[in-house]
Amino acid sequence: MELRDPSLYAPSGQGDGAVLLALRDPATGAFAFPRTSYGIGATGTPAEAAEPVELSGRGEVLVCITIHQPLAPEMQVPLLVARLRLEEGIVLDGIIEGTEEPPPGAKVQAVLVPEERGGTRMLTCRFRVLGRAA
Amino acid sequence: MSGLASMRPVRVVGIGMHRYQFPTETPYVALGLTALREALADSGLAWPDVTFAAIGTAAIGMAAGRVMLRHLGSTGLEVMQVENASASGSSAFRAACLMVASGQHEIALALGVDKFGSGQRAAQKDGIPRLTPAAEIPAVKFALMARAWRDRYRLTREDLARVAVKNHGNAARNPYAQFRKPRTLEQVLNANPVAGDLTSLQCTPRGEGAAAAIVASEEAIRRHGLDRRRAIRVLSSVASSEHAVADEGWSLVEMVQRSGLSALAEAGLGMEEIDIIELHDAFTIEEIVYAEALGLCPLGEGAAQLRAGLWDIGRGRCAVNPSGGLLGMGHPIGPTGIGQVAEIVRQLRGEATGRQHPGARTALAHMIGLGSVAVGHVLRRD
């Protein structure tokens, strides 16, 4: 099955796990996610001077909420959105699998799961709470 | 001295509004001209006296100003359109103030007008895919903030809802407000859930409207024989955008803090001297977080102050969002920041019938805009 956004993530090679595709500034170690041609905002480093890296997709929940109303076209609710801190230090927002809100500090792993949107079934990235059934 | 303090004095001499309302078929020109004519009448000036106009709008399209202003007469004035998301009106007001303060013009207009638009944003055209577009939706972003503050500072759902109760109550007394109905805590808590702990009555409504403010130099006030007692001094005007800070993604809070401190410092005042704050409460959590960031109370004590009624009109030292704020008065985008100024001017003149904060002399108008940007103004009655 094809990936919904192959510029954002890729299979990790371990089950349905995913890695996230980022840029790293070799001089400072600063990351940029998503990986873009615009460079690294934290340092102003152009993309050509940065190295493409894979982020582990592992991290922890800082805060999570449930969206109760479809606030965008094709949004299926209830939907869990969380602010996460990845092991590499990057803070980003992602969708959590399931409908039970994980508490702050819960460990998560990026996974690739099938999703049907606009009549097409593709693999998309979700975050799975570790230590509980999906 | 820097900013406005280093330039010649600027005063607001006229204000006008078109009530904020749910979207209608009324052309924006009618909305804008209503506010402008009211501001001219309030000031005692004639249209040809105004030589600069900054039009704050986010959804109408290119060249909104001349299409509207020509109906008052083509006087050859300088016209500039300002778009700065939710801070469009505040930025237009800032432009008008700077034009007068710098000596470029003697009398300048800031006019905010908007119709409810598509809501399309430049961030949707940046060519960058996102893990979840949901996180870009303001209701989601601020529901995350509400939950983070609940975890960090033990905010309760009732604390959040109290912001809406206060601001809907204030709006009910404001003839220019979109919502004119007081709400109980139960009504706010039991309204439709939107995201996280936010219910529909804790989110700003979609709408349209217009607001105008005319600013003038001391020389213009003298020359035109305007009533100086009703002319409210603009002490400071600041604008900025986010700094990157490692704080779990809440850098806009730091931006608000920095911006507020800067506005007060430029005015030469402390927060303890501010009697009124109009701030960006598109979602209930914002009022608590920004009031704390602006220095109205120590971090984590906003909810207790709100519970004690200290931010109410006539009860505490400083009334927060006496207009009803974005939650109650509405948030048509382009007019919002100028609507804040209009409310403040009314309050400082002692003309806010039915919702007057007694003895109000100084006020802070503070807006943020998508991106994020911040714009602040401090105003004072002599």
Image (cartoon, rainbow, N blue to C red):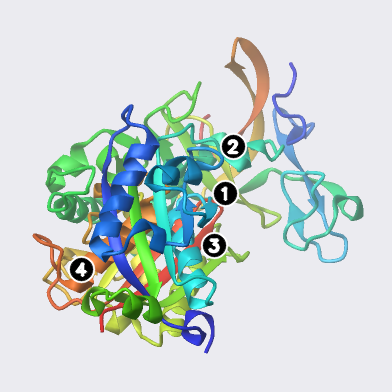
Q: Is residue A81 above or below residue B339?
A: above
Q: Position of residue A90 (x, y in %)?
A: 66, 54
Which residue is drawn at the image coordinates 62% and 37% (left, top)? B124
- Label 4 and label 3: CA atoms lie apart by 32 Å
Q: Which residue is mark 3?
A: B251
Q: Which residue is mark 4?
A: B347
Q: Which residue is mark 2?
A: A127
Q: Which residue is mark 1?
A: A84
Amino acid identity at mark 3: Ser
Q: Is residue B119 visible?
A: yes
Q: Earlier in the sequence, mark 4 or mark 3?
A: 3
Q: Residues within 10 Å of mark 4 (few under 14, many from 20)?
A: many
* Residue nearer the viewer, B90 or B215: B215
Amino acid identity at mark 1: Leu
Element on which disc 1 rests: strand
Q: Chain of mark 3?
A: B
Q: Nearer the viewer, mark 4 or mark 1?
A: 4
Which residue is drawn at the image coordinates 59% and 14% (left, top)? A118
- Label 2 and label 4: CA atoms lie apart by 50 Å
